[in-house]
Image (cartoon, helix red, strand yellow):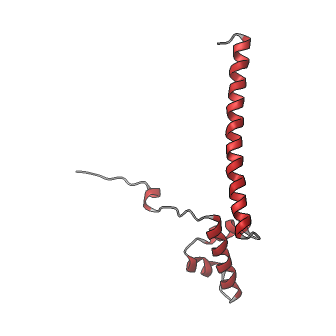
Amino acid sequence: MLVLRLNPRSIMKKKKHTPEQIISLLRKVEALTATGSTIAEAAKQIGVSEQSIYRWKNKYGGMDKSQAKRLKELEKENQRLKKLLAEKDLDNDILREALEGKY
C-alpha cells in the first residue's frame, strides 16, 4: 500500500505580492470601505486575508508606488550589508584565533 504524505504548506501556496501590487490592493480596500463595506468583506473581494490587510497597512499605509520601490531597494541593500558585516566578523575571529595560537 502506497501512502502519500503531503506537507500542508505544499497544498496552500503563499502568494507573494510586490509592494506596488500591495499598494494597489490597499487603494481598492480603501475605496470599498468608503462605500460601506467592512474590511473583512473588502479582503474577501480582493482575495486576501483580513490580517494581510492590517499588516500591509502598517507597512505600506501612506506610501505611493515609488516610495515602496525605494523601500524594497533599501531592504535589499541592508541585507547585503549585513551579510558583508557577518563575513568580516568571521574573518576577524579567524585572525584573532590565529594570533592567539588557537589554530
Task: Mark yes or no: residue 51 visible.
Answer: no
On screen, residue 49 above or below 84: below
In the image, farthest residue toward the right: 62
In the image, farthest residue toward the bottom: 35
On screen, residue 101 above or below 83: above
Instruction: From the viewer's perspective, tell me whether residue 3 is left or right of residue 69.
Output: left
Quarter that holds the C terminus:
top right
3 vs 73, nearest the viewer: 73
Identity of the residue drawn at 74% across and 65% down: 67
Residue 71 locus on image (x, y percent): 72, 59
Name which quarter of the figure residue 22 lies in: bottom right
Name which quarter of the figure residue 23 lies in: bottom right
Residue 86 locus on image (x, y percent): 69, 34
Residue 101 locus on image (x, y percent): 70, 10
Identity of the residue drawn at 71% across and 19% down: 95
Identity of the residue drawn at 68% across and 67% down: 56
> So how many labels did they put on this image?
0
Name which quarter of the figure residue 91 lies in: top right
